[in-house]
Image (cartoon, helix red, strand yellow):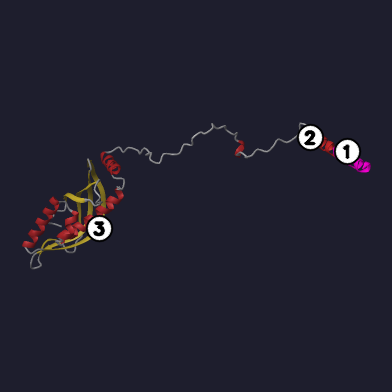
Amino acid sequence: MNSQLLFILLLATVAGIILFRLYTVLGRRTGNERPPPERFERVGGAAEQPQAPNQPVLLPDRNARTEEPQPSDPVSQALFDIKLADRSFDADHFLDGARKAYEMIVTAFAHADRTALRPLLSDDVFHTFDQVIAEREAKKQKVEFTFVGFKEVKIAGASLNKTVADITVSLAAQFISATLDSEGKLIEGDPKAVRDVTDIWSFERNVRASDPNWRLVATSGEADLQAH
């Protein structure tokens, strides 16, 4: 028993000496110790800004409208107003449609195609076109017509009256047109010459309507209906 007790006391003494040495090596501060590393490294050495607790994060308002520049001339202002009333409106797209409508209308008019004309014209314009077609039919006249193309197409005027948009377009076009009598004799025009004309047409549309098509509501210019 005495030998076991002596052995335990010896182990306790050795353990105490080891712990004391560890303390003398690891437990002291010399003042040259490296500071503990920061949890996150800041780019460019920017100082960390304290944040208030539970501070809300501000997100951009998706419904906020950016302020658009105001146009200076009346036509641009009217087109701007139409765009505000109908976000799908685009002036270049409209002019492309006006070109197609012009070619369809003058071709259908020359060929007396009332079915093609009806959805493209207002009631007043269709009535005028129909009268001229009826007169040609009564005289048994025939129109030979070939559309060549455009030299220039541009917007000449625009307005917005409540929900009704009106855009006037200047169309400088080229086509071949000749009117023949019942025996095939030339009455007017030239079946071989390209003719230059400038028509001023007005198109109208209710911007609140589901129908995206514009209708021709007025015509004027160098080309008379009879000459078409």
Q: Which of the two discs, 1 and 2, sits closer to the camera?
A: 1
Residue in view at x 16 percent, y 53 percent? 223
For the C terminus, which image quadrant? bottom left
Task: Report which quarter residue 192 is drawn in.
Answer: bottom left
Q: Amino acid at mark 3?
A: Gly
From the viewer's perspective, is 36 left or right of 101?
A: right
Q: Which label is found at residue 149? A: 3
Is mark 1 in CB contact (under 8 Å) with mark 3? no
In reply to whether residue 24 is colored magenta, the answer given is no
Give the image location of residue 56, x and y in percent.
Answer: 49, 35
Residue at far bottom of view: 183
Mark 2 or mark 1, which is nearer the start of the sequence? 1
Residue placed under numbered mark 1 in the picture: 13
The answer for how far apart the CA atoms under marks 2 and 3 are is 96 Å
Mark 1–mark 2 distance (CA, rounded to whole Å): 20 Å
Q: Is residue 228 above or below residue 41?
A: below
21 w.r.t. 97: above or below: above
Residue 170 spot, x, y in % from top left: 22, 49
x%, y% of residue 121?
17, 53
Closest to the camera, between mark 2 and mark 3, is: 2
Write the residue at 25% across / 56% down. Answer: 100
Residue occupying the point 92% across, 40% down? 6
In the image, the segment drawn in magenta is: 1-16
SS at circle 1? helix
